Image (cartoon, rainbow, N blue to C red):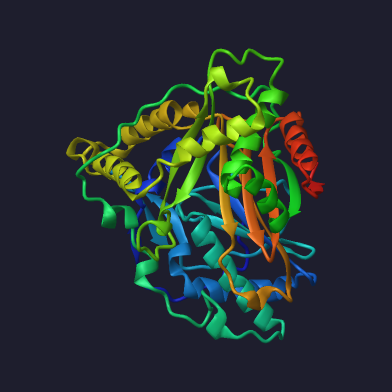
Amino acid sequence: MKEKNKRKIKVEDRWLKLDNAALIYPSAQNNEWNAVFRISVKLKEKIVPSILQDSLDETLNRFPQFNMSLKRGIFWYYFQNRRTFPNVSKEILHPCQKIELGSYNHLFRVLYYDKKISFEAFHSLTDGTGACAFMECLITSYLMKCGNKLDLKKINYSPLDKANEEEIEDSFIRYADLKERSKHTGEKAFKLVGTKEDRGILNVVTGEIEVENLKEIAKRYDATITEFLAGLYFKSMLISQKDYNLKNKPFIISIPINLRKYFDSKTLRNFSNFINVKLENKHFESELSEIINIVKEQMKQINKDYLMKNINSNVHAQKNFFVRVLPLWIKNFALSFSYSKFGENLYTTNFSNLGNINISDEFIPFVDKFEFLIGSPKYNGVNFSVISFNGKAELTFTSSIKEKKIEREFFRLLSSLGGKITLSSNI
């Protein structure tokens, strides 16, 4: 992101280690891709760029851990605080463009267009929870600078709050007891077939639906919204890919899990794990109800013990003496290979449900909706994400594949079940 008219600031000279989940992303990047995601808010009034800029400066004073660049050490990458703030920019390109890393670059960008504000971040910096906290503070500052009155006692992250060390901790390191560990096993997943888009193009298709409408449909299958949508996603992929050889590999959906729901953590850095939900070949002809039951059965294994074993496995690898003393150039090669072999290679697609965004009802008079986008995968073609606010759920597909068969089947099936959906797209 280009920065002009940089505003010099006085900051404490500080560096931070990357958290356990963040370590792989710098090594996994290439010339065309790195892991970027987006949280957007659509307000009811047109954005005033100068006020948004002042609000961003104020928000970064509240969250100094976001005002970082990525530096290369001898053994690991690390974060170093920046002495300038970035400029907000008008959005002119497709969402989730690669964020250029380096000593003079920030790890996020704030964009605006018409009534929308978007926060895009390199995934090493934070996860969805941290991004939502940053956006809540940014919106609070912006609305107040526009002359609106908000009760700051009802705001989770106010620009008047002080930076909190608990928000900066690596909770993986804090909770790992390094006793029982999970075994990283898996099988190669089916890869969605389609025509690859040109570099830098990310197709976005969003369906808006009332949360109660979605809950009512999921309830018919005795499922949570996440379980129901995962089952529907499986069915949509099977129908849209039926002309290809489906018998060779399973369909696997990787579903992130917010660890803050299981461990007492206030960190705004990465603190999530995942479960890979699999649909085996023998179930490819199953009805939707049976597929949802298969998803439900696998989701039952999620508990604190299951997640602790995963945390221990990852932290144990990080703390291994031989791994620690390897120079960074060797780690880069090893981690990039690991991401290929044990990352996207082991799942077909990613489905991330942030659920009902945890912000104050103070925003309801000013906010139309929130959106959550996962950027283009490195190898896979399609991602699916969900976020809810004020009774509305935004179901968003992001794709680097030109064909829209999966999206079309998904919303067709949801509509046939009684879903009242409003579709929008950047295509």
> Residue at coordinates 64% horizontally, 75% vertically from top-left?
361
Quarter of the image containing the N terminus?
bottom right
Identify the residue at horizontal 67%, vertical 41% (top origin).
398
**In this picture, residue 248 sits left or right of residue 76:** right
Image quarter for residue 370? Answer: bottom right
Q: Tell me if residue 36 comes above or below residue 64 in the rendering.
A: above
Is residue 280 positioned above or below 109 on the image? above
Viewer-side residue, 239 vs 11:
239
The spot of residue 420 in percent (x, y) is: 80, 50
Q: From the image, which quarter does the C terminus lie in?
A: top right
The location of residue 50, given as percent across then percent down, is 70, 74
Write the residue at 61% across / 48% down: 225
**Vertical side of 335 occupied by 310: above or below:** below
Q: Quadrant of residue 313?
A: top left
| Residue 7 appears in the rendering | no
Relative to residue 4, is residue 283 depicted above or below? Answer: above
Q: Position of residue 249 (x, y in %)?
A: 53, 18
Does residue 159 appear in this view? Answer: yes
